[in-house]
Amino acid sequence: MADSSAAKRTKGAQAEERKVDWRRWKQERKAEKKKWKEMKLLKKLEKQRMRELAEKQAEKQKEEQKEDKGRHYTLSVALPGSILNNAQSLELRTYLAGQIARACAIFCVDEIIVFDEDGEDVKSVEGDFEGIGRRGKACVQLARILQYLECPQYLRKSFFPKHEDLQFAGLLNPLDSPHHMRVDEDSEYREGVVLDRPTKPGRGSFVNCGMRKEVQIDRQLNPGLRVTVRLEEPQKPEAKVRKGTVVSSHHPRTVSGLYWGYSVRLASCLSAVFSECPFKEGYDLSIGTSERGSSVDQATLPSFRHALVVFGGLEGLEAGLDVDPNLDVTDPSVLFDFYLNTCPSQGSRTIRTEEALLISLSALRPHINEAVKTPSNSCRKENH
């Protein structure tokens, strides 16, 4: 009997051990399953994180590629307003100014500086032409015509009231720059004028961008202001207005690589061309043009952000030096990084400034492209 009881107790203990072992195995299995699930979840989260990271990198690359389309350098041209005094009539003065504007637009010039080499001390276009042969207001007239031609046709009535300087502007050839849009032309950007129309607070302003529909921008601005607008894709074609965002005037150039016209600046003397530079870092490449300079063919330009090319008038750059109170030099070549002859072995005794502009910008173009490493067609209008 004792043996039987002991056997039963042994069997009972063994059964209890087996139960304990079973529970332990179940717990271990459960822990393993939980761990496996956690690992699976971690892997899933890691995959998701990697996918999101890849998407972000792809988006960043796309943004960088988009940014790379832009042109990040500027080209400025400076010339004396006195070149208009060479023309014998108001019509010819106007046409000469038109030739200057066309040449600058063709070669994607971003800034035109009209400097005074006659000591007129002119700093704005607020003035009137005083007649041919009176040594007066040539800088003002040239600057005003240049500004008029750069302005898109549909905005000219808003910014240029009737003026004697512009009476023959109808004779001039249009610049036909990318920002001179036709009414039905599709484009990502447009120039516009803020309209004097009441809007609800926080709803922005209305802008005339030369389209059949007005554009509602994202900011409340003063009426009569000229703005560059980036148009949004029309969500509803039947909507009465288009939506747009105000961007800086250089945004089309730096982001999309579009040539977006030039600005005009008046300088009271030759030294003011440099000292009143609108760029914080100034012009990091300056080129003077003269028949006494070294040949452009041998020139190798360094990389730059803001280049300036300066042209003289009938008497060359020396005339500007003579009347400049801030310059105490007699040789103009010391003012520039490069002093170049852009038309070696010329067949005429003189090259007129409007001719020198085309010759020089054409001769410098391959050197500039090499210096900035941009495609030769970077300033062409993009098809939208």
Image: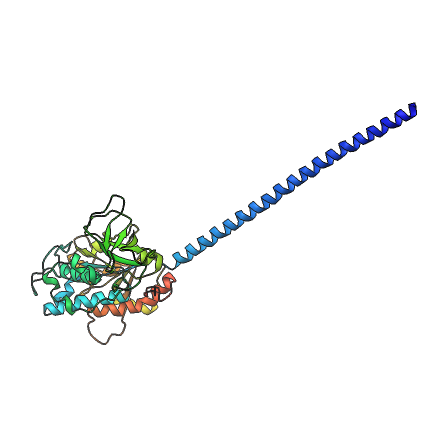
360 vs 281: above or below: below
- List the single residue furthest toward the front: 1
**Horizontal side, residue 89 vs residue 264: left or right:** left
Quadrant showing the C terminus? bottom left
The total number of labels drawn is 0
- List the single residue furthest toward the top: 2
Quarter location, residue 87: bottom left
Quarter location, residue 105: bottom left
Residues 164 and 90: in front is 164
Quadrant showing the N terminus? top right
Residue at 26%, 74% (x, y): give it.
Answer: 345
Q: Is residue 116 visible?
A: no
Residues 8 and 230: in front is 8
Q: Position of residue 154 (x, y in %)?
A: 20, 61
- Colour mode of the rendering: rainbow
**Horizontal side, residue 137 vs residue 375: left or right:** left
Q: Position of residue 143 (x, y in %)?
A: 17, 60
Residue at 86%, 28% (x, y): give it.
Answer: 10
Q: Position of residue 254 (x, y in %)?
A: 34, 56
Residue at 67%, 37% (x, y): give it.
Answer: 31
**Horizontal side, residue 38 vs residue 313: left or right:** right
Residues 300 and 144: in front is 144
Q: Is residue 192 visible?
A: yes
Residues 305 and 68: in front is 68
Quarter location, residue 163: bottom left
